[in-house]
Image (cartoon, rainbow, N blue to C red):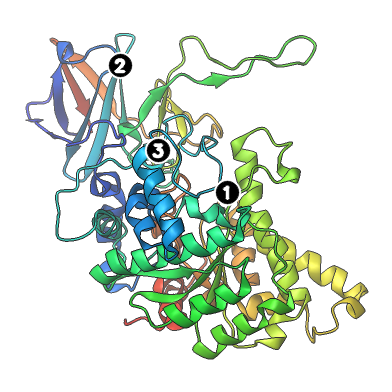
Amino acid sequence: METIRIGRIEDFGERDRKVIAHGDVEIGVFRVDGEFYAWHNDCAHRGGPVCQGRLYGRVEEPVAEDGTVGALRYKPGSLNIVCPWHGYEYDIRTGVNQGHPALRLRKAEVQVTNGEVYVVL
Amino acid sequence: MDAKISIPRELPVQEIDVYTDTRDLLAHSRREARRKGFEDWLICDIDAHHVETVSWHEIIEYIEDPVVRDQALMYQKERIGAPPYGLNGDLGLRYQDVGGRIPHQSDRREKVTETDVHRDVTLTRRAMEGFACDYMVVFPTPMLFLGMHPQPEMEVWLGRAYNRWLIDKVLSADDRIKTLAYIPFNTPKEAERTVEEFSDAKGVIGFCVTSTRYKPVHHNDYMRLYAMLQERNMPLAFHAGYHWQDPSLMTVNRFLGMHALGFAWCNIVHMTNWVLNGIPERFPNLKSIWVESGLAWVPFLMQRLDDQFLMRPSEAPQLKRLPSDYMREHCWYTSQPMETTNMKALEVTLEMINAETQLLWASDWPHFDFDVPSVIFDLPFLSEQARRNIMGLNAARIFDLKR
Ligand code: FES
């Protein structure tokens, strides 16, 4: 086990990230709604730099009772990290892929102690 | 907390955007290349792109017709916000980047400080470094629509200007960058002239028909062109594209669906005409390459044509064998965008096209569905020799590239 110091809590604004490399390992640490999440920077598709992608809400298309559809919208409270190589989208909190839930990001353990954020490998 | 606490290094790019250097964007591909020892492999990328419209003001200087050239120069000089002179196409219907989710498809505004070569040479070199490839074949991007131009002569003027500009500014600068020169296919005589003039030009290793066009590839008007290509041992690529205004695609409201169908559809039509009219029988040594349609369409078409041909051989009397035999032995395929969600299906597909000799790896960089070389390297059901062939040796053989 190895502990890596990422930074102080106050270094992270809401939805900020730090993507770090340690040896061969790259990890992205994100702050969302005050919580920290850390994922390996390797997309489940083809190993792309997923943690260096952009954040978007999950798009949904509400269906009315009569089966019709109208406007698209972002699902309230949702947030996806989008791999910049080909656009695979993962829930930033769970690491689960939007289109194919069997695909997941590899989690890294985050610890927050005395105002410091660490990742344990 | 453990006693030993390590301090990592922050990656230079935290969030990738349109300004990100290609080498940073493809750093993971480069890392894989190192891990897998690609330095010992010949890697040829048979389909990558540059955005020629960034250099449109330079390209129009190469238009041969002096009147049209002047018109183009004035247009470029005096209009702000207008699309590039003379180009047809899809204007704002370019949703490839999925609303900014895939920035390298939106734009490439990375810094280029090198001044000794054209910007596109530098960008191509950076991509080659990312893929660890030895050769990269570049194609234009918006010009892929030129086959639908209402003025066939504009395809001739712009295609020729582009070829000359590309040779001068890009291909001359680096032996590793190649092209399949643009053929103005809608004007057969000019297509022949293109082959005559550019066959020996630096970096030209074959010719390309952009596939989105309504022309029968089996028309008698093209037989001289095919004979010329066969005689020169120059492959002919059919580079797929989409055409959303195609009546059959106008009911498809999602870019995803239109793009998925369009890129396969144009080549399905041309291949059907190519084979059923016996072009491979008439020109047995002419190498046709089917570019950027992926691979899943090939087994579908092989089965479909074989099945129907056996019931109606009198309608395709030139064929001495099954359509799929011609598709397997006389045709080559670029791999991208390789469909990989069903590995069993992919394995059968590669077997059906005899991938060991007929398949050529292609990245299609910088498009949203680009493939890294590892898509071939990682295939568990191929021998090492087959993977080496697909990643580079097949291309070296058919294009006569130095190894
Ligand atoms: S590698 Fe991430 S989407 Fe392809």
- Residue B378 visible to the viewer: no
Residue type marked 2: Arg
Q: CA distance from mark 2 to mark 3?
A: 23 Å
Circles 3 and 1 on the same subunit? yes
Residue type marked 1: Thr
Q: Nearer the viewer, residue B257 or B377?
A: B257
Badge 3: residue crowd in 10 Å (few <14, some 14–19, many ≥20)? many
For residue B275, above or below residue B293: below
Circles 2 and 3 on the same subunit? no
Q: CA distance from mark 3 to mark 1?
A: 26 Å
- At horizontal 16% and vertical 39% (from top left) the residue drawn is A22
Q: Position of residue A75 (x, y in %)?
A: 52, 14
Q: Nearer the viewer, residue B50 or B372?
A: B50
> What residue is pinned by disc 2?
A15
Total numbered badges shown on the rendered structure: 3
Residue B124 occupies which quadrant of the picture?
bottom left
Label placed on residue A29: none
Figure quadrant, ligand 1: top left
Q: If the image is split into quadrants, where does the N terminus of chain B sit?
A: top left
Q: Are marks 3 and 1 in contact (CB under 8 Å)?
A: no
> Is B53 situated left or right of A112 in this image?
right
Frontmost of labels 2 and 3 is: 3
> What residue is pinned by disc 3?
B106
Q: Secondary structure at mark 2?
A: loop
Q: Secondary structure at mark 3?
A: helix
Residue type marked 3: Ser
> What residue is pinned by disc 1?
B341
